[in-house]
């Protein structure tokens, strides 16, 4: 089959992404628009087959490297291609290379995601020294009835969901006006747990881009008019993602984080999702996670204790892989990473 490189319109691209077996939120045009508002330039490259349909493609996010060293091209959870079809892979990578180089890319970083067994080295990639997305995540099966989902959780999580209702925690689906409340919770959480959060405008932009499309929802849990926890959940096809969550130090005995997370899962099921990605746990083997989660709180360890109770499994992605166009700049990039890690 012959393929022709094209630059698809956003609606055509999103239709392709939604129908792809490896569909992911971070490959949608709306995600490109979100990143465009904060310093990235989205670029979509696709292959059209003989029937005029998109057969494969990749959304690239472009960002200038420091010191006028060119551009980084990054494809999160892409490319969307049949890795078992050598001709399709070669044609797409050729089109991606051309587009990336036209935009001054020194190298291309891809993070193809989970459940992939492709020989990426054979396709010209090398393991990257730097990941962008957490390599390991916690995936929940939310197919079947609510009783079946609850039965897969551990006893403590089920009990805390019930406590949230018993202790008069009210759950509401947030409006645009509630984004400010969510931002306040996010900054409280970041200060407490010592992790970075996005600017307030970021979550507002995410709401504006995804909620009207029916691809996201904001849920807030409150008691006596005071917001205690919130989540922003996204869905596409059979997949859902818990990308952002926050909680207050106030009234923690009411287990608001459990009630609002359960509301997010129920919403994802209503959208047809069967898999709920809790997005990010420490990059350690399951045995180490279980042995250390009660004593460690650094990095993603602080969230693993909460996530492990929801009845899922730890999944590791294939990580990040780089395709080098300019070896000198790539060597400088690796040196800068080593210096940052040693400082």
Image (tube, grey):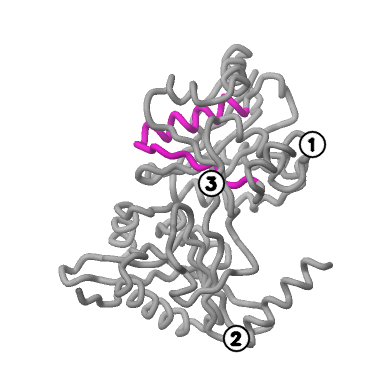
Q: In the rendered structure, which disc, 1 or 2, sits on the residue that comes first in sequence?
A: 1
Where, by quadrant of the figure, is residue 43 drawn?
bottom left
Badge 2 local density, few (<14 within 10 Å), some, or many (20+)? few
The residue positioned 63% from the left and 42% from the top of the image is 286
Q: Is label 2 or label 3 in front?
A: 3
Q: Compared with residue 305, is residue 96 higher up or lower down, i.e. above or below?
A: below
Count of numbered badges drawn on the protein: 3
| In the image, farthest residue toward the left | 51
Give the residues drawn in magenta, as a range. 257-281
Place of residue 107 in the rendered image (x, y in percent of width and height, measured from the top left): 54, 78
Place of residue 34 in the rendered image (x, y in percent of width and height, measured from the top left): 50, 58
- Magenta segment: does it hold 49? no
Q: Which mark is residue 265?
A: none
CA gap, disc 3 to disc 1?
A: 22 Å
Element at label 2: helix
Place of residue 273 in the rendered image (x, y in percent of width and height, measured from the top left): 38, 38
Mark 1 lies on residue: 295
Q: Compared with residue 114, is residue 330 higher up or lower down, i.e. above or below?
A: below
Badge 1 local density, few (<14 within 10 Å), some, or many (20+)? few
Place of residue 78 in the rendered image (x, y in percent of width and height, measured from the top left): 44, 63
Q: Tell me whether the residue at label 2 lies in contact with that at label 3, contact meaning CB atoms closer than 8 angstroms.
A: no
Q: Compared with residue 311, is residue 16 higher up or lower down, i.e. above or below?
A: below
Mark 2 lies on residue: 327
Where, by quadrant of the figure, is residue 13 drawn?
bottom left
Q: Compared with residue 67, is residue 144 higher up or lower down, i.e. above or below?
A: above
Q: Which mark is residue 315?
A: 3
Element at label 1: loop
The residue positioned 73% from the left and 48% from the top of the image is 299
- Magenta segment: does it hold 278? yes
The residue positioned 77% from the left and 69% from the top of the image is 340
Instruction: Determine if residue 106 is in view.
Output: yes
């Amino acid at each position: 089959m012959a393929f022709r490189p094209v630059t698809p319109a956003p609606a055509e691209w999103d239709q392709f992404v939604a129908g792809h077996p490896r569909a992911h939120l971070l490959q949608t045009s709306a995600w490109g628009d979100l990143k465009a508002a904060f310093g990235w330039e989205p670029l979509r490259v696709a292959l059209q087959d003989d029937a005029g349909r998109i057969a494969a493609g990749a959304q690239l996010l472009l960002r200038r490297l420091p010191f006028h060293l060119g551009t980084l091209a990054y494809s999160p959870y892409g490319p969307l291609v049949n890795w078992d079809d050598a001709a399709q892979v070669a044609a797409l990578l050729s089109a991606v290379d051309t587009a990336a180089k036209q935009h001054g890319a020194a190298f291309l970083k891809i993070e193809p995601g989970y459940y992939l067994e492709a020989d990426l080295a054979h396709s010209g990639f090398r393991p990257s020294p730097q990941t962008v997305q957490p390599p390991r995540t916690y995936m929940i099966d939310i197919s079947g009835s609510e009783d079946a989902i609850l039965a897969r959780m551990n006893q403590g999580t089920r009990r805390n969901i019930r406590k949230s209702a018993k202790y008069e925690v009210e759950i509401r689906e947030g409006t645009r006006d509630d984004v400010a409340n969510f931002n306040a919770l996010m900054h409280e959480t970041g200060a407490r747990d010592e992790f970075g959060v996005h600017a307030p405008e970021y979550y507002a932009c995410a709401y504006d881009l995804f909620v009207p499309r029916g691809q996201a929802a904001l849920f807030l849990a409150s008691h006596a008019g005071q917001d205690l926890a919130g989540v922003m959940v996204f869905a596409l096809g059979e997949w859902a993602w818990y990308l952002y969550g926050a909680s207050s130090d106030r009234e923690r005995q009411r287990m608001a984080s459990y009630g609002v997370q359960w509301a997010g899962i129920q919403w994802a099921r209503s959208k047809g999702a069967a898999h709920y990605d809790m997005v990010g746990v420490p990059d350690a083997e399951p045995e180490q996670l279980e042995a250390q989660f009660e004593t460690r709180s650094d990095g993603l360890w602080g969230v693993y204790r909460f996530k492990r109770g929801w009845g899922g499994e730890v999944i590791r992605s294939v990580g990040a892989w780089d395709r080098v166009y300019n070896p000198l700049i790539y060597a400088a990039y690796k040196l800068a990473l080593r210096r940052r890690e040693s400082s």
